[in-house]
Amino acid sequence: MAVESPFILVNPEHCVGCHTCELACATAHTKAGTVIGAILAGERLQPRNHVVQVDNVKMSTQCRQCEDAPCVRVCPTGATYRTDTYTAVDQRLCIACRLCVMVCPFGAIHVATTEVAGREKRAAFKCDLCVDRPDGPACVEACPTKALSLRYPSEVVQQSTKATSKQFLEALESQQQLTSNP
Amino acid sequence: MTYSEKILSRSIDPTVHKMLARAEELGLETAWDRYEAQLPQCGFGELGVCCRNCNMGPCRISPFEEEGPKAGVCGATADIIVARNLIRMIAGGAAAHSDHGRDIAHTLLLTAEGKAGGYEIKDEAKLKALAVEYGIETDGHTKEEIALELARAVYAEFGKQEGPIQFTSRAPEKRVALWKKLGVDPRGIDREIVEIMHRTHIGVDNDPVHLILQGIRASISDGWGGSMVATELSDVLFGTPSPIRSQANLGVLKADEVNIVMHGHEPTLSEMLVTATQDPEMVALAEKYGAAGINVVGMCCTGNEVLMRHGIPIAGNFLQQELAVITGAVEAVIVDVQCIMPSLGALTGCFHTKLISTSPKAKFPGATHIEFHEEHAYDIAKEIVKTSVENYRFRKPGQVQIPNEKTECMVGFSVEAIVEALGGTLDPLLDAIKSGAIKGLAGVVGCNNPKIQHDYGHVNLVKELIKNDVLVVNGGCNAIATAKAGLMLPEAAEQAGEGLKGVCKALDIPPVLHMGSCVDNSRILVALAAVAKALDIDISDLPAAGAAPEWMSEKAVSIATYFLSSGVFTVLGPMPPILGSPVVTELLTQGAKDIVGAVFAVEPDPFKAAQLMINHIEEKRTALGI
């Protein structure tokens, strides 16, 4: 069975638009690991997520880690590829053609200047779920209002199924006619 | 007893370990827990790039290179916002120090008018010396008459519209000339603070360098103004400190006595409390409730004030305020202003301890408010002591856990006391500096901050300095840390380099000299100015450096800035919120050298920080040809 692909879910009711997740994201992807340390070392800060505001509602947006990802399909160099659990970018192969940017329905990819193998180049950036980070996604950990969470769809499905099944059972108890044969 | 890694990582002080374990056991939270709950702290705040100065905002500048807003709604860039925010911190710090100075001037005025309830002029010589400085006639006048004139003259300094203020003339002539040339010579103590608030209002001063220069001016009006007023007039009223022995750390609390912790800053209250605890009526009351006596101890800077003048033991520095309560042995924590955690209300509520607020300026949740007014100082102090003593009967002996640790210390090194220790003249010190026995001077000050392991920065920095023959003068929470670490004893000279050891032994002084509370950092300025004048050079030419290894308060920002403005290279432990602005960062860490002859460096590692200071001192020695 394939390993399940999680993604980051935002609860817009909790998001206050503080942008802390962006900074945590950018910081987690520096060598220094702290905002102050990165700036002192002259490292670029590059967030992979974005806080947006739509009709007075604020929320963070980032890659959904699509399983049949348009960015992967469209990539001419194989820089964007799919692992078991997420959609990755190999910046060494990226030629900054921006096709992935054009096709992403979530606007979750952007191209920026970065240093790859000692060379300055333009390359695509997207959420990697902080797969190498022991404590999981930095944005989730940093969110002061707990608006962000790392979710496994099957877990969500299971929870929903259980909840609605429980509701159904309760309904049965009070509405005998549902089980009595016609 | 072994402690968890978490507890050990929070402090180097064993009393802190013990009390944090006790807090865990009781399910009580402390500043360290609340700090952890705040993590990660907002990166925009850390960089200083958020602005709430008007309601088009809050605005925030993106630290990301290619995206996000690079200006606030009004158009303010990161440079403008960082500069405005930093000097507002200076305004806050200068206001706190200077308002403290104003309160002391008020007490002197009331004392001179015969309206103060129990104060007297203890140091007449200093009164007269200050009167001469202010051009006040002393011949044929009583000390009260002189004090009245002096108090009025000092009062006027706060509202002065055109400078200069009196004490800036204590700086070397070159320094004063430089300040005038730069347009940063303060015009009045309050004026510079008000002008910061004006300039940082939406749409006023939008030049980062120009803004920082006003910050410098306000900081000078603190260090050479409000703080110096506080120090000098406190000496007049309560006596100029001279060497005295005492003890430091939570172990000064006593299991069988009424423990009163005086916490805050202004000696007007603590001086009177000390007297009131000796009142036979109060002592008898304590006995009536079964206590063996009344044990009054200090905490933070008000503790430093009474430690310096009366040898009242000091229970700890800033991060130990909650821990004193957790001992369960404290009948009352008496507070006035500054650095008093609002958490104390809820925390004292878990014990029999009373939190008593006293300042008309400062109320706290969960506190009993007994307002202090100088006119009835003694009566109010007695009422406070009585309330504390009466609370002894509610102490739960089963809840009492007092750490054993307390360390002997020798404190009380005002400038006058240092000169006296030197034999009446600065010459032995100058000779030691010239010969290299003492490589240089370091002023180490500042707070505690849970971002740095408690006392780790303070103690290691100071140890490293004395080991390298740098004589340390200190104040505030750094002084308390070094007292607890046993560095304020003549015997601590053994930990100093050969040269400094020799000087300390010859003079029978510690290698670390306690100069007082945080307003008393002005004594460090006076000492540096005196040495510079004696060598006929500017302060910036001295083999001297400053440091604030665990700073956190706005007052510390003002102190660090007046050190810098006075020409003292200063190393900060925690990073100030300026990195969001390349202009301000460059100005304060490099450019300022060509402006005021000194810069800031930031180095949280105390060993590396010491090395920066020693290198600077060596450079200055080379430049002086010594």
Image (cartoon, coloured by chain):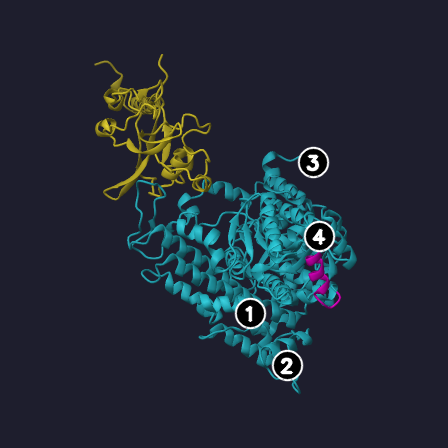
Chain colours: A yellow, B cyan
| Mark 2 on the same chain as mark 3 | yes
Percent coordinates x, y for residue B503 in the rendering: 75, 56
Q: Residues within 10 Å of mark 1 (few under 14, many from 20)?
A: some
Residue B516, located in which quarter of the rendered image?
bottom right
Could you tell me which chain the residue with mark 3 belongs to? B
2 or 4: tag closer to the N-terminus: 2
> Which mark is nearer the camera, 1 or 4?
1
Q: Residues within 10 Å of mark 3 (few under 14, many from 20)?
A: few
- Which residue position holds label 3? B1
Which numbered circle lies on residue B252?
4
Look at the numbered disc 2 and give the secondary structure of its residue: helix
> Which mark is nearer the camera, 1 or 2?
1
| Mark 1 on the same chain as mark 4 | yes
- Which residue position holds label 2? B144
1 or 4: tag closer to the N-terminus: 1
Q: Quadrant of the N terminus of chain B?
A: top right
Question: What's the magenta region?
Answer: B423-438
> Which mark is nearer the camera, 3 or 1?
1
Q: Quadrant of the C terminus of chain B?
A: bottom right
Residues at marks 3 and 1 touching, judged by CB atoms closer than 8 Å: no
- Which residue position holds label 1? B173
Give the Cα distance between marks 2 and 4. Answer: 38 Å
1 or 2: tag closer to the N-terminus: 2
Could you tell me which chain the residue with mark 2 belongs to? B
Along the horizontal axis of the image, is B531 left or right of B450?
right
